[in-house]
Image (cartoon, rainbow, N blue to C red):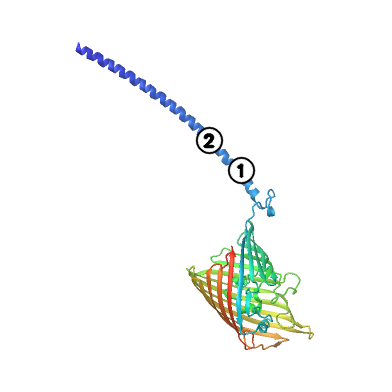
């Protein structure tokens, strides 16, 4: 009996367990089916979202060219300056150049102290307080991109006598194959020194050969066009040519010929000599028609002029605030034409073969710079023939200079310079002392090498 009861109990338990297990399996099955249906719905919704995003991306791709066209400064669909809808704020800077000058010569002697056989133009500086190394007490610089194809530059000097538009020119930025064009009024790239503004000079004044051949500020701003080419070579080499109006008073003259009558051709190369040093060099020629009264007093010269140059600059810069720069340049002038004396009513032939050289060194030690320069004329060529007769103009002009300058910041320069000038050919020395102050404010474009 007991055994029968045990068997019945086990049967009931097993039956109940099987029934419960079957019920649990059915519930799990129903739950999984519900989860799968929910996930399928979620996947469908996410797929719809993905398709919608794809459509939106495709629409944006189609709209980008239209948007770029609308933003282009050449588009006629937008308003603004020259068709552009966005004006780029120009970089503007103002520079003050003032100095104290002292010479053993009087102001009248300085004004009449030219270089016989080269120029009748005297010195601009006067004893006491002066404004500007080149009679420009202040200079306003403006630079800004015009559009993706041109940049615009302007340099406007101020003096006690008024305002001068020394430079205003546009430079291309998108010509292919290394070509670049410049048009407007600009300082010629005939040489590195000629292209610099006075505040960029390593000395208060320009080198003596420049004063003798082209004037105290170099060739100055000339109206014209420049084309340069920078081919893909193993080291930097730039070829350039300029067509200029020829308004420089000493070498050409505005009335020498109607239209452009001055031209330049130059080559500039550079390469690294060591890890911390670079050599820059190149030949150049500047030539054209001349009509000037600045060579011989009370006479006017008409003829042809050609100025040949060879320059070299070596820079060693092991640290940002330490370095050495050695620079030199040789200039050779060939000039031939007629010299007319309106008072005596005579016309004589004039033939010049003259040269000049300057060498200088600048050592930078933190915020201090020490510099020395020697420049002279008639080094190898000293022919000055008037009416086929060679004139003896006296001893060869020369000058020695030394300077020390302190730069508290990149916006300030304080320079003390001494010149022992024997360029007057009269045996007298012009011993000059200059204390110069240069201050600049605003954003200024970086200087070239």
In the rendered image, the vertical position of residue 54 relative to residue 268, given as above or below: above
Q: Nearer the viewer, residue 421 or 375?
A: 421
Count of all numbered marks drawn on residues in the image: 2
Q: Residue at x 58, y 41 (%)?
A: 58
Residue that extends furthest to the top in the rendered view of this protein: 1
User: Which of labels 2 and 1 is toward the front?
Assistant: 2
Q: In what quadrant of the picture does the N terminus appear? A: top left
Q: Position of residue 95 (x, y in %)?
A: 61, 68
Residue 196 makes an appearance in the image: no
Task: Give the mark nearest the N terminus, 2 or 1.
Answer: 2
Q: Position of residue 239 (x, y in %)?
A: 61, 67
Mark 2 and mark 1 residues within 8 Å of each other at the beta carbon: no
Could you give the CA–CA distance between mark 2 and mark 1, rounded to whole angstroms?
20 Å
Q: Say what secondary structure mark 2 lies in.
A: helix
Q: Position of residue 389 (x, y in %)?
A: 71, 88
Instruction: Give the residue pinned by disc 1.
Output: 62
In the rendered image, the vertical position of residue 326 relative to residue 46, given as above or below: below
- Tag shown at residue 49: 2
Q: Say what secondary structure mark 1 lies in.
A: helix
Residue 143 makes an appearance in the image: yes
Q: Residue at x 53, y 35 (%)?
A: 49
């Amino acid at each position: 009996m007991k055994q029968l009861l045990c068997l019945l109990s086990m049967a009931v338990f097993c039956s109940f367990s099987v029934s419960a297990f079957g019920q649990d399996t059915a519930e799990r099955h129903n739950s999984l089916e519900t989860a799968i249906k929910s996930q399928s719905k979620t996947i469908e919704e996410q797929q719809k979202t993905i398709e919608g995003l794809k459509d939106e991306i495709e629409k944006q791709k189609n709209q980008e060219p239209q948007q770029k066209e609308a933003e282009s400064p050449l588009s006629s669909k937008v308003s603004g300056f020259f068709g552009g809808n966005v004006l780029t704020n120009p970089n503007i800077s103002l520079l003050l150049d003032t100095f104290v000058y002292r010479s053993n010569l009087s102001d009248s002697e300085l004004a009449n102290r030219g270089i016989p056989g080269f120029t009748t133009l005297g010195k601009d500086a006067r004893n006491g307080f002066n404004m500007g190394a080149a009679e420009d007490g202040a200079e306003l610089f403006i630079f800004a991109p015009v559009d993706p194809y041109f940049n615009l530059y302007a340099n406007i000097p101020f003096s006690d006598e008024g305002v001068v538009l020394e430079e205003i020119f546009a430079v291309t930025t998108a010509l292919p194959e290394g070509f670049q064009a410049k048009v407007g009024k600009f300082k010629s790239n005939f040489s590195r020194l000629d292209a610099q503004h006075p505040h960029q000079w390593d000395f208060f004044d320009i080198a003596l050969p420049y004063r003798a051949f082209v004037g105290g500020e170099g060739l100055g701003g000339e109206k014209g066009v420049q084309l340069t080419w920078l081919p893909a070579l193993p080291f930097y080499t730039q070829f350039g040519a300029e067509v200029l109006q020829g308004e420089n008073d000493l070498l050409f003259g505005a009335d020498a010929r109607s239209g452009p009558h001055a031209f330049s051709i130059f080559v500039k190369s550079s390469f690294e000599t060591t890890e911390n040093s670079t050599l820059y060099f190149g030949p150049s020629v500047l030539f054209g028609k001349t009509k000037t009264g600045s060579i011989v007093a009370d006479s006017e010269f008409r003829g042809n002029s050609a100025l040949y140059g060879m320059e070299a600059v070596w820079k060693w810069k092991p640290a940002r605030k330490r370095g050495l720069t050695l620079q030199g340049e040789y200039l050779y002038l060939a000039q031939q034409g007629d010299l007319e004396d309106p008072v005596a009513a005579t016309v004589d032939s004039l033939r010049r073969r003259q040269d000049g050289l300057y060498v200088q060194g600048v050592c930078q030690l933190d915020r201090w710079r020490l510099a020395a320069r020697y420049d002279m004329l008639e080094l190898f060529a000293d022919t000055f023939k008037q009416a086929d007769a060679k004139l003896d103009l006296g001893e060869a002009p020369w000058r020695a200079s030394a300077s020390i300058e302190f730069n508290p910041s990149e916006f300030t320069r304080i320079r003390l310079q001494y010149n022992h000038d024997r360029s007057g050919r009269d045996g007298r020395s012009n011993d000059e002392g200059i204390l110069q102050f240069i201050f600049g404010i605003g954003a200024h474009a970086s200087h070239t090498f």
